[in-house]
Amino acid sequence: MDMKMLARVGALAFVLLAILATAIEFGREEDAPSSPPHAPIAAADPLRGELVRCQLLGEAGVRDTACLRAWAENRRRFMAPGARPMERLPQAAAPTSADDVVRKETAPAAITPESE
């Protein structure tokens, strides 16, 4: 068997394998989701439900006045003072002295003769 024939057999095997994989993939039945994953969240917060509805509208949501009001309310909630819970913010350690603050903020990235 010469190299040309071996290459043709290999190419034919590859094509047949690709056709078989395609046939198996098309033969699968997809499971339909029982409910959308955002349903419990939308029921708990009416604004969240409206935002989900606006998201499903797609490009038409930009022209919907209810969506514009919902987005404005969402921005107001997000940007309101105290909107972030304090427990999520990390506690910054207070510097021991003012000299430490200056060194940390102005220290070069490279090794200096002082530090050696």
Image (cartoon, rainbow, N blue to C red):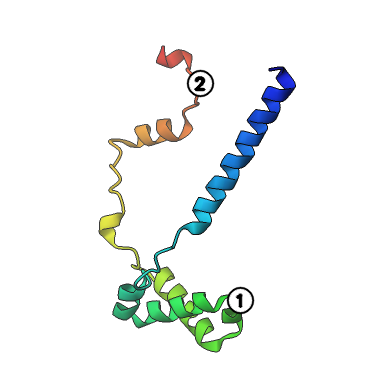
Q: Name the residue under label 1.
A: 59
Amino acid type, label 1: Glu
Above or below, 10 relative to 83: above
Query: Seen in the image, is 47 located left or right of residue 11?
Result: left
- Which residue is situated farthest in the bottom direction here? 65
Amino acid type, label 2: Ala
Secondary structure beneath label 2:
loop
Q: Mark 2 points at which residue?
A: 110
- Asked whether 98 or 78 is in front, the reply is 78
* Residue at image location 57% in from the left, 86% down from the top: 64
Corner quadrant of residue 34: bottom left
- Asked whether 112 or 2 is in front, the reply is 2
Query: Seen in the image, is 3 located left or right of residue 51?
Result: right
Secondary structure beneath label 1:
helix
Give the position of the N terminus as an image quadrant: top right
* Residue at image location 54% in from the left, 52% down from the top: 23
Mark 2 vs mark 1: give the one in front.
Answer: 1
Q: Which of marks 2 and 1 is nearer the N terminus?
A: 1
Give the position of the C terminus as an image quadrant: top left
- Asked whether 94 or 75 is in front, the reply is 75
Above or below, 86 relative to 102: below
The numbered mark at residue 116 is none
